Image (cartoon, rainbow, N blue to C red):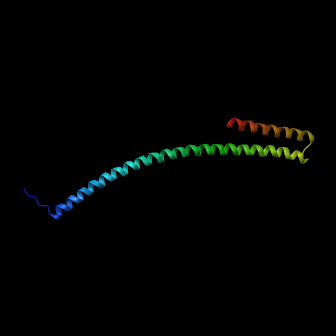
Amino acid sequence: MEMTITLKDAGLIVLFVCLIIMVIYAIFVLKNLVITLKKTNAILDDTKVVTEVAQRRTTDVDGLIDDVAGAVSGITAPLKGEEKTVQSVSSIVKGVSSLVGVVKNKGKED
């Protein structure tokens, strides 16, 4: 039994084989793409958590800086002689107690 293959048939066979190879390649690419997307989503979720923590810490630190600035200004004003003696002593005590409170709160947060 003899069988002849024309150039047209050979070309179609080659194109069909190439098409099958391309489909298999596309399946592997899509599989890798899905894995990459899952890892990217996990990284983005972690980044979101870290960003939220950083935002909370920044707000806390901003409040602490305001407290420290108020305490320092409460101590420096009496030392410059801008208040009476009783007010000076009470301001110094308030400033020191504020600083102690800030330090204690900072220790509890860590």
**Residue at 89%, 39% in the rendered image:** 89
**Residue at 66%, 46% in the rendered image:** 58
Q: Is residue 95 left or right of residue 3?
A: right
Q: Is residue 102 left or right of residue 27?
A: right
The relative height of residue 60 versus residue 4 in the rendered view (above or below) is above
Location of residue 4 (image quadrant): bottom left
Name the spot of residue 12 as percent of width and height, x first.
20, 60
Q: Is residue 64 left or right of residue 22?
A: right
Q: Name the residue at the right extreme.
A: 85
Name the spot of residue 56 as percent of width and height, x first.
63, 43
Q: Is residue 49 left or right of residue 4?
A: right
Location of residue 17 (image quadrant): bottom left
Name the spot of residue 82 as percent of width and height, x first.
90, 47
Viewer-closest of 1 and 72:
1
Location of residue 9 (image quadrant): bottom left
The relative height of residue 76 versus residue 9 in the rendered view (above or below) is above
**Count of residue discs:** 0
- Image quadrant occupied by the C terminus: top right
**Residue at 70%, 46% in the rendered image:** 62
Name the spot of residue 60 as percent of width and height, x first.
68, 42
